Image: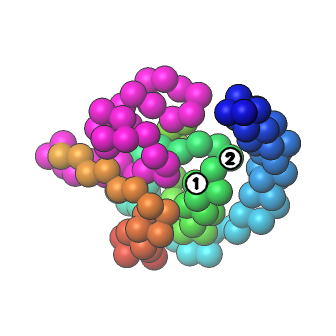
Amino acid sequence: MRPIIRAFFRLLRLVLTPFMLLSEKLSTPRAEIKRNPEQQAEVDKQTANLALYQFRACPFCVKVRKEMARLGLNIELRDAQHDPTHREELEKGGGRVKVPCLLITDNLGNRQWMYESDDINAFLNRQFG
């Protein structure tokens, strides 16, 4: 019975993934925050210390990516589903393979792993909103 349930959910994911990605593409907002080139360069410098571990079709990851687009942020996206290096790094650093996860590295090299899409979006709004 268990293999049948797994197969059902894999098939469901295969069917729904293209629709989720198309929906994201059609509904992702344009950057609401307009910055001059100097301000955007400063924001890009600040976001260079951020990386989002994500699965492409995860609805919570889509939520964070939409917020990043709305805020006009260029944050590195790391695919923890298909890239074994990123998956291992997420598991070792963050303690578990759960997405979305925002890796925040400060100027001293200290790393903070932030899980939960609502927490990540709140952090991004506080820092860049």
Residue at left offset 43%, top offset 40%: 97
**Mark 2 lies on residue:** 57
Q: CA distance from mark 2 to mark 1?
A: 7 Å
Left/right of residue 62 with respect to residue 16 in the rendered view: left
Query: Disc 2 residue type?
Result: Ala
**Mark 1: few, some, or many residues within 10 Å (few <14, many ≥20)?**
many
Q: Is residue 106 magenta?
A: yes
Position in image of residue 80 (x %, y %): 51, 35
Pick the front one: 8 or 97: 8
Looking at the image, can residue 105 be seen? yes
Locate the C terminus and report the quarter of the image it occupies.
Answer: bottom left
Q: Amino acid at mark 1?
A: Cys
Residue sitting at 59 percent across and 42 percent down? 55
Residue that sits furthest to the left in the current view: 108
Q: Residue 28, how many percent across, how many down?
A: 72, 63
In the image as oriented, which residue stretches furthest toward the top? 84
User: Which residues, given as a range, are shown in magenta?
Assistant: 80-109
Quarter of the image where one finds residue 9: top right
Magenta stretch encompasses residue 5: no
User: Does residue 65 sit above or below 6 in this rendering?
Assistant: below
Residue at image mark 1 = 61
Residue 13 locus on image (x, y percent) = 76, 42
Where, quadrant-wise, is the N terminus in this rendering?
top right
- Secondary structure beneath dot 2 equals loop
Residue appearing at x 79%, y 38% in the figure: 8
In this rendering, the answer to whether 37 lies above or below 5 is below
For residue 40, above or below residue 83: below
Q: What is the image's colouring?
A: rainbow
Q: Position of residue 103 (x, y in %)?
A: 35, 48
Please say if the residues under marks 2 and 1 sit with CB atoms less than 8 Å apart: yes
